[in-house]
Amino acid sequence: MLTGRNILLGISGGIAAYKTPQLVRLLKKSGADVQVLATTSALKFVSELSLATVSNRPVLTGIFTADTEGEYTRHISLGEWADAFVIAPATANTLARLATGLCDDMLSLCFLTLRPDKPVLIAPAMDGHMYNSLSVQRNLSTLAEEGCRILEPESGSLASGQCGLGRMPEPETIFEALAGMLATPEKSALNGKTVVVTAGPTREKIDGVRFLSNYSSGKMGFAIAADAARRGAVVRLVTGPVNLPTPPGVERIDVESAEQMLAAARPLFDDCDLFIGAAAVADYRPEASVEGKIKKKDAEMEIRLVRNPDILAEFATNRKPGQLAVGFALETAGGIDYARKKLTDKQLDLIAFNIYNGHTSGFEVDTNVLTLLGRDGSVTELPLLSKEKAAAKLLDAVETILPR
Ligand code: PMT
């Protein structure tokens, strides 16, 4: 799968480092060449000899290790050589150093010399309280904003004997995430196509300080945009207010209200091959929005709501031949008939019936349960998946109906 790919594997000093020889083996088995960059702390948890043996290369640690002529600039040649950089486990200390640009060992040096178009996958692992600390979260946000993909730690028993968030995902999970990031876009029917995705909630102003909205986090729409970009599509993402970094290679347009979302999306209609509405667009907005703050009175207050324009329906009903329209329908269990009705009413090619259960599926959470309903009557029930995997399954289905 990764034949001919050059991977830098950065290992920092956490207990999960003991699992990294297995990650090296998986990478090597799939055909990749792996250069391990371990911090000195990492080598207290995993032996240099094990890593050198499985990678078949010397492990690099400090910046002054060159003992051979011509290797004094090895960090620069490694930055050019690598097709991807994986940092697993990434400790709080390493995250802080990467986020601030410190470069006093080979791992952090190569992080700076890596070519900017190459993907970086970071798997933080540490005690749950450390992970949730403000500084770790701030550093993770900085790295994510710079385009690094953060593989969330898992919950389970920790080195401290406590149970909670902080475990590094298994080597197989890290390997799969990396393989997905390096998947060759040329094989995808979406390669070279133009895709417009809507994501997130909309905010409908009541006055200068209040609005009507919903709990959409944007995660589903952003996962679709990221995967479409990885498949080689030109992706334009029109999003309501969310707290997510822009996926690499995606053009992002930020909006607030449904009317603004339509105004931003409309000029993109003509030029797109595929429109995917993953946004939770408010169906109604206050008829009038008041400047400043509405003052509290003793009497009750009524807000009159008027219908918002339907962005997806406008695209679908006016589209040119060959353009595809895909929507979502969030319904509680049993709402598949509502989803089917939206498929027909909005004249879509495909709709993802999104079950809302308040725990693992729907708004905010990292996982989702979708059933894909095709215009041709096809029904594909997907199991509980991460939003990234659900996005990939949706796009796989889209690829089968996309005109070549
Ligand atoms: O953002 P997350 O927290 O990850 O959550 C993801 C999600 C639950 C928001 C997403 O997966 C989802 O289901 N989005 C659609 C929510 C919904 O119920 O939409 P709807 O039934 O109101 O609309 C149906 C379709 O028409 C949707 O594709 C919607 O984007 C589109 N629509 C709706 C109204 C409107 N005025 N304009 C639209 O384009």
Image (cartoon, helix red, strand yellow):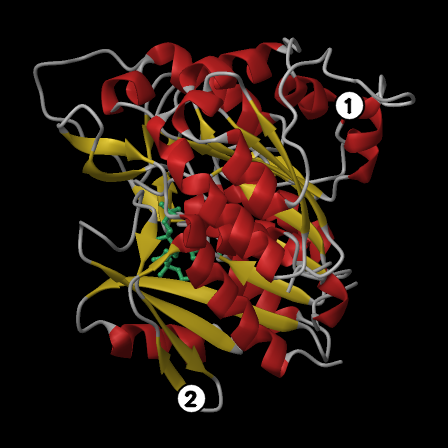
Estimate the spatial distance between the alpha carbons at disc 2 and disc 1, rounded to whole Å. 52 Å
Q: Is residue 397 left or right of residue 161?
A: right
Q: Which residue is mark 2?
A: 378
Q: Amino acid at mark 2?
A: Ser
| Residue 104 position (above or below residue 115) | above
- The quadrant in which residue 335 appears is bottom left
Q: State the image coordinates of residue 136 (x, y, percent, origin top left).
A: 40, 16
User: Quick check: 320 above or below 269?
Assistant: below
Number of residues whose C-alpha sits closer than 10 Å to that of mark 1, classed few (under 14), some (14–19) or many (20 or more): many
| Beta carbon of the mark 2 residue lies under 8 A of ligand 1 | no
| Viewer-proximal residue among 341 and 57 | 57
Q: Nearer the viewer, residue 378 or 53?
A: 53
- Going by the picture, which residue comes out furthest to the right? 70
* Residue at image coords 46%, 54%: 388
| Residue assigned mark 1 | 75
Which image quarter holds the N terminus? bottom right
Which comes sooner in the sequence, label 2 or label 1? 1
Q: Residue at x 53, y 76 (%)?
A: 397
Mark 2 residue crowding within 10 angstroms, few (<14) / some (14–19) / many (20+): few
